[in-house]
Amino acid sequence: MAGIFISIAAIAVILLVRGSGGLRLLEFPAYDTLVSTTAGSDEQPRIALVTVTEEDIARLGEWPLTDLTINRIFGRLAAYGPRAIGLDIYRDRPIPPGTEALERTLLENRRIIAVKKFGSLDSPGVGPPPVLEGSQRIGFTDVVVDPDGAVRRGLLFLDDDSGVSFGFALRLAMVYLEDEGITPQPGEPDPSSIRLGDITLAPFDGNQGPYVAADPGGYQILLDYRDGASPFRTVTLTDLLNGDVAPAVFRDRVVIIGVSAESVKDVFFTPFSSDLRRNDTVPGEMVHAYITSQLLRSALDGDAPLQFMSQYLEIAWVVFWGALGCLTGLAVHFFLRLFALMFLGAAVILAATWGAYIGGWWLPAVPAGLSWLVTAGLVTIYLSGYERMQRRELMQLFSRHVSSDIADEIWRHRDQYLESGRLRSNRQTTTVMFTDIEHFTTVSEKLGPEVLMDWLNEYMEIMANLVSRHGGVVDDYHGDAIKADFGVPIMRTTDAEIRRDAANAVHCALEMAKALEDYNRLCKARGLPHLRMRVGISTGEVIAGCLGSSSRMKYTTIGDTVNTAARLETLDKESFDTDQESSDCRILISEFTLGLVEDLITARPVGSVVLRGKTTPVQVYRVDGDETQENVVLKVSEVMA
């Protein structure tokens, strides 16, 4: 449930950030990548450029160009038969010589479109040629520049105090299309939009494509740049004036005259600019050429503009990938597998976005990708941390004496064993062992506290490790006593498993006896007391589970079987005389335990004994040795096989 809440919060944050425009610096590059990887056409654009370079300015020895030079340009172009000529050079005042001739050409040649520029807070406006003031042969050159400096939108109309003004590119397209009998018409189904041919160019509303809450002022369209990075045939001014141009370059085309000289600074970034921090720009005349070409393609070729989902569908798209990321994080717990799936999901989003763009639709890849990656990552991180906490709590329950096989088995099937951070309580058949040191109180009085603790810890270390090696769990330490369980916490369901647990417990006790002999030899060399040990083992039904408070909890077993094992260990402990025993370890087991392991050990009856706290006699047996003459250590993997 927590993973779901984390995912909902992550998706909400992503949508809020996108809604505030916080993802645009990621979405702009995504849009640019789609544009640059899908742009390009075998068809020659209907646009050609005449550009004024630094070399042209140096050769002519003049800037700005005089009216005479501009009139010569018009004369040269007229001979090639273009459909429209656009002068992307401001001519708001006469620059003699040749002023009268230029004015006459502007008035007579109705295929020429001149430019003006609206004023702004940063720069004053620039007027049109005075002779064309108030005519329909003027277009503004203002462009919309995005926050990162690139031009991705084109302005078709602007409305100011003087009325509606047409953009430079739209004016050129209208002159070209007039020969095709195409004029701007009301859009369908919205008559307030503009339609060219069969294509309606709906105005940009500020929330399309990579844009969120952008300024939709004027009549803007999103540029598709489908012509490619350098699609337009470009001729230098010198080549034009010298006549070094093939007639087909300009015939029946829109010709735009502009400046590419660096000293003029009429340059812009586009989606093809590989690095917006470098001088990877195009001249302004090329930007207007892109807009003009897009308008002509729409009118003549039926190129539809990019389509967009509604805001609600975009939200649903983002939520879908977030929900899928959440489910993936909940289902996959291995980081390598998760990384592979996250990569695959991101690839699917990119492929879907690319395919949709080819089909004329925009899908918001960045918020969807973030929703997928963030939810999958956060849920996995949360679950990983939660699982680490669970595993830490689990290991705290069993201390470091739980065998790795048991720990791994519990962890792999933790849903079966854990409930609310605790191991589920179960009624199961288990073999319980108690061990205790003979006359420990008397022995301990002869040692100092530090020596005593070191000596006792060393003894406990040896015995606890043997329990773990035989598949048991050290349940508790009480002074010099050890309680161990064989057959927990993994519940045994077959007779074979129960017999193996009993065999492991008895073999563990026999190995403890051998280890005690070795340890006593070491103690003798150190001048430490000689140790003797009692062991009680009983097999039967117990209740296994967690006991204690939330701050201090342990896994343990309770029940009559536990009490029986404890009583067997203490049985006639005063009669366990050091001088009369041949072994340093006495092992007593119950009759039921003997029945499970009688073919593996040698044992002799002690008798029918009424144990303390019981009313029914219990048959008790003392284990003398291993029938096979070697201990058989049964691993958990064998028990669970």
Image: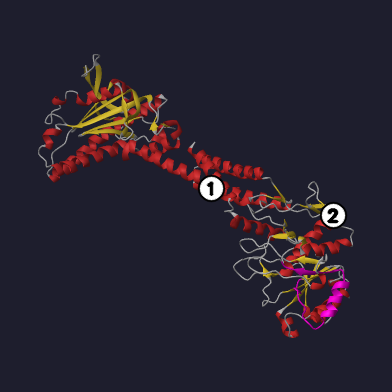
Q: Position of residue 621 (x, y in %)?
A: 24, 22
Residue 195 within the magenta-colored segment of the rendering: no
Query: How did the renderer colour the structure?
Result: secondary structure
Label 1 CA crowd tier, 10 Å (few <14, some 14–19, many 20+): many
| Residue 102 in which image quadrant | bottom right
Total marks shown come to 2
Q: Is residue 185 visible?
A: yes
Q: Residue furthest left?
A: 446
Q: Position of residue 353 (x, y in %)?
A: 67, 51
The image shows residue 162 at horizontal and vertical percentages of 76, 62
Closer to us: 617 or 231: 231
Left or right: where does residue 598 sit relative to residue 448? Answer: right
Res 374 label: 1
Identify which residue is drawn at 81% across, 59% down: 297
Q: Which mark is residue 197?
A: 2
Nearer the observer, 463 or 17? 17
Name the amino acid, label 2: Gly
Q: Earlier in the sequence, mark 2 or mark 1?
A: 2
- For residue 47, above or below residue 530: below
Give the extent of the magenta segment.
Answer: 88-117
Q: Secondary structure at mark 1?
A: helix
Quadrant occupied by the C terminus? top left
Q: Secondary structure at mark 2?
A: loop
Camera-near label (2 vs 1) is 2
The answer to whether 351 is drawn above or below residue 122 in the figure is above
> Seen from this angle, which residue lies furthest front?
161
